[in-house]
């Protein structure tokens, strides 16, 4: 994609190429650890009988990153499991009613993550990244 022309130090005109932009058509998929369940007895009708999970985004190394958030769960995961999720408008597509008011939706369970041919995260390994000794974490 051509963004315009500029002058080099030699005085020659050179084409400038614009930096590629993120494709807004596809949502960004992220990984997280389920850290708890959210129980809500009163909620919007489009969310009736839909479980809510409290999730903490993590890196591929398993360390926490960013703020925890609530996500709808249509696959049936539980606390301690590693999942991948989508946010934004596309999160509602995980539900029967794609017009439900949700910001995050769990779309799958992670068994392991390979980066550059090396396994960096396994769901069946003990969680070493939560606060050890924290009674709320048990």
Image (spheres, rainbow, N blue to C red):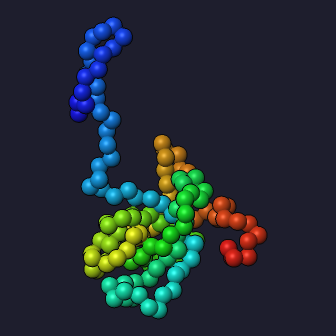
Q: Residue furthest right?
A: 133
128 is higher (above) or lower (below) than 81: above
What residue is drawn where x is 53% and y is 46%?
Answer: 118
Residue 59 visible somewhere in the drawing: yes
Residue 111 visible somewhere in the drawing: no
Left or right, 17 with reference to 55: left
Where does residue 93 sit, x and y in percent of width and height? Answer: 30, 71
Residue 87: quadrant of the picture: bottom left
Where does residue 111 sit, x and y in percent of width and height? Answer: 49, 63
Where does residue 42 sit, x and y in percent of width and height? Answer: 44, 91
8 is higher (above) or lower (below) than 121: above
What residue is drawn where x is 32% and y is 67%?
Answer: 89
Where does residue 62 sit, x and y in percent of width and height? Answer: 58, 57
Residue 131: quadrant of the picture: bottom right
What residue is drawn where x is 67% and y is 73%?
Answer: 137
How many numbered dots are placed on residues in this image?
0
Q: Nearer the viewer, residue 1 or 64?
A: 1
Location of the C terminus by quadrant is bottom right
């Amino acid at each position: 994609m051509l963004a315009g022309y500029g002058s080099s130090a030699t005085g020659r005109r050179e084409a400038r190429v614009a930096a590629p932009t993120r494709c807004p058509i596809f949502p960004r998929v992220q990984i997280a650890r389920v850290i708890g369940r959210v129980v809500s007895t009163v909620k919007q009708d489009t969310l009736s009988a839909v479980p809510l999970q409290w999730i903490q985004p993590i890196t591929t190394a398993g360390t926490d990153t960013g703020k925890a958030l609530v996500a709808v769960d249509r696959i049936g995961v539980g606390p301690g499991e590693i999942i991948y999720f989508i946010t934004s408008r596309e999160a509602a597509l995980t539900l029967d009613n794609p017009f439900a008011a949700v910001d995050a939706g769990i779309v799958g369970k992670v068994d392991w993550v390979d980066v550059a041919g090396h396994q960096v995260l396994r769901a069946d390994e003990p969680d070493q990244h939560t606060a050890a000794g924290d009674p709320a974490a048990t």
